[in-house]
Amino acid sequence: MDGSEETLNIALQLLHSFSQYSGLNVNFEKTHVVWIGALKYSTQSIKARWKLVWGCTQFKLLGLTFDVDLPKMIEQNYNDKLVKLENIIAHWNRRELTPLGRITVVKTLILPMFIHLFVSLPQPREAICKVLNDKVLKFVWQGPSKIKAKVITKDFDEGGLKMVDINAFIKSLKLSWIRKVIQGQNKFTSLAKKLIDFNILCNTGSLYAISAVKNITNAFWIDVLTIYSDFVKSINIDSVDKLVDMPLFFNNCLLINNKYIFWKYWYDDGIRFVKDIIKDSGQILSLQELQAKMNKPVNFLHYEGIKKVLSTYIVSVQNVKLKDYKVHSYPILSTYIKPIILNSCNKLLYNMLKENSEIPTCQTKWNEYFADDSIQWKNVHGQVFKKTNNTYIQWLQTRIIHRILGTNSHLFKMGLSDSKTCTFCKMSEETITHLFWDCNTVKILIKDISDSLKNAKIQIVINSKMFLLGDTNVNDSCFILFMEVKKYIFECKRKEVIPNFQGLKASLKLSLNIYANTTNESNKGIFWKVIVCKRRLELFPFEGGRVIFGQSKKINKT
């Protein structure tokens, strides 16, 4: 339409005629007419047979709010979703959930609400991303963060909680557009290919994306190419295959006089990857061999320049030697583009983007406490999530390992407790190690457990490292027993009740009853046939394994 009355009426008549044949009627009373171009803010109306809504600057289509001023469109859509986010958070804040449960809410209810915006719109302003991230973290922790943001996004066995790294998540969704364009054959992909030469993008390094950005004005594709360039730079060349499949041109690792390399006659003759100028023995081709392969003369300066920078780079790559190179099929895609093209889902991309070298602070502190640098931290962090589904126990052990459990010492420093002395002995400062191991009251309880195990002919020497952090040398049932004991001790601390062996037995019975009704009998270990008391051995019909336990039974003060 050209903005005239005639063309508008023709278009409306066509829609009306179509409705008579298809039965799909246009609700003209709710149809908004939006001026674009020079008249985008105009309130001018055109007389038509049907009643239309004039003077609009926005309309909603496929879940997105469109605005005649495109830059406003991004902020408007995100602000609308942030309002809905507040409502979801307010609803779930009324429930008593652990951070593990709240992370599940983030993954299943909050982030899916934004995915359409992440995929369809250019990157939001940094301020909007910060607001979104801050709101989500505040919801997860119900206040200030207890564990570093870079740590909680890691897997369980790395000390994380599998929290979503929102920034990496957005980037992985943006990168998926490169795969869609390369593999797709439709009108949209053809438009994208007019902006960017995806053939060169797939066969060169990050600097091509940077140079392409200078020639386009589309904000969405500028974001995609910028993210791709950063992604390529983050890839670690840690194997011979990655090294030989690395592109020669537009590669930020191979620069001559601080400028990228691109020799079109090499590229057109198929010399695009490191592999193309490497012999089967792993040595760089000589000038004569390269000329024979290309069947044409090669500029001597070009050859010597690339040979020098490539040789220097190969030496700088640790633990990767070209002599280990074995001939394989010709690479269809470069090292950099393979993770994007060869994976149908974004999980691998996301994992690569969120990867960081941050180490939980707690590991250093526990190493100092035990004077032991050989602790297998992957096993320590991950075993509670492998051996039980009980989120109460999982979160309790996570707080113990990360040293963020609310002991009196910790609460006193925060101004939330009047005293930092132990709830049980009233003598020493109540730290995590004191509460669960050094306190005399707890020592008596652990000694009773140890004696009962010996009476049952189960030989286990319980030490502080095994009890506090867990030990992969003990079976699942023993690990769950220690967790149940720590749960009982912490419940006694919260209720200001002195822990004792009879109270522990009652707590274990309750947990066992829940286990008996919720777990497959075929999932057995060797320990739960022993529920101990001071004088005799009691046998119960169910045995240990992967256990789901409930809350501790209330224990009277003794």
Image: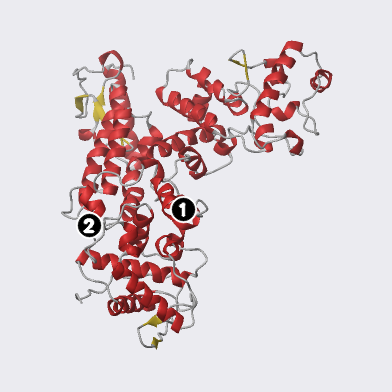
Q: Is residue 60 visible?
A: no
Most distant residue in the left direction:
418
Distance from disc 1 to disc 2, alpha carbons, whole Å, reads 41 Å
**Residue 504 vertical position relative to residue 540 in the rendered view, above or below:** above
Spot occupied by residue 420 in the image (x, y as percentages of width and height): 22, 55
- The amino acid at mark 1 is Ala
- The amino acid at mark 2 is Arg
Spot occupied by residue 291 in the image (x, y as percentages of width and height): 81, 18
Nearer-the-camera pick, 470 or 333: 470
Quadrant of the rendered image containing residue 502: bottom left
Name the residue rendered at 79%, 24% in the picture: 285
Name the residue rendered at 83%, 22% in the picture: 289
Quadrant of the rendered image containing residue 384: bottom left
Q: Is residue 439 visible?
A: yes
Quarter in which the C terminus is drawn:
bottom left
Spot occupied by residue 14 in the image (x, y as percentages of width and height): 33, 30
Residue designated by label 2: 95
Q: Secondary structure at mark 1?
A: loop
Decide which of tag 1 and tag 2 comes sooner along the chain: 2
Q: Secondary structure at mark 2?
A: loop
**Residue 16 vertical position relative to residue 312 in the rendered view, above or below:** below
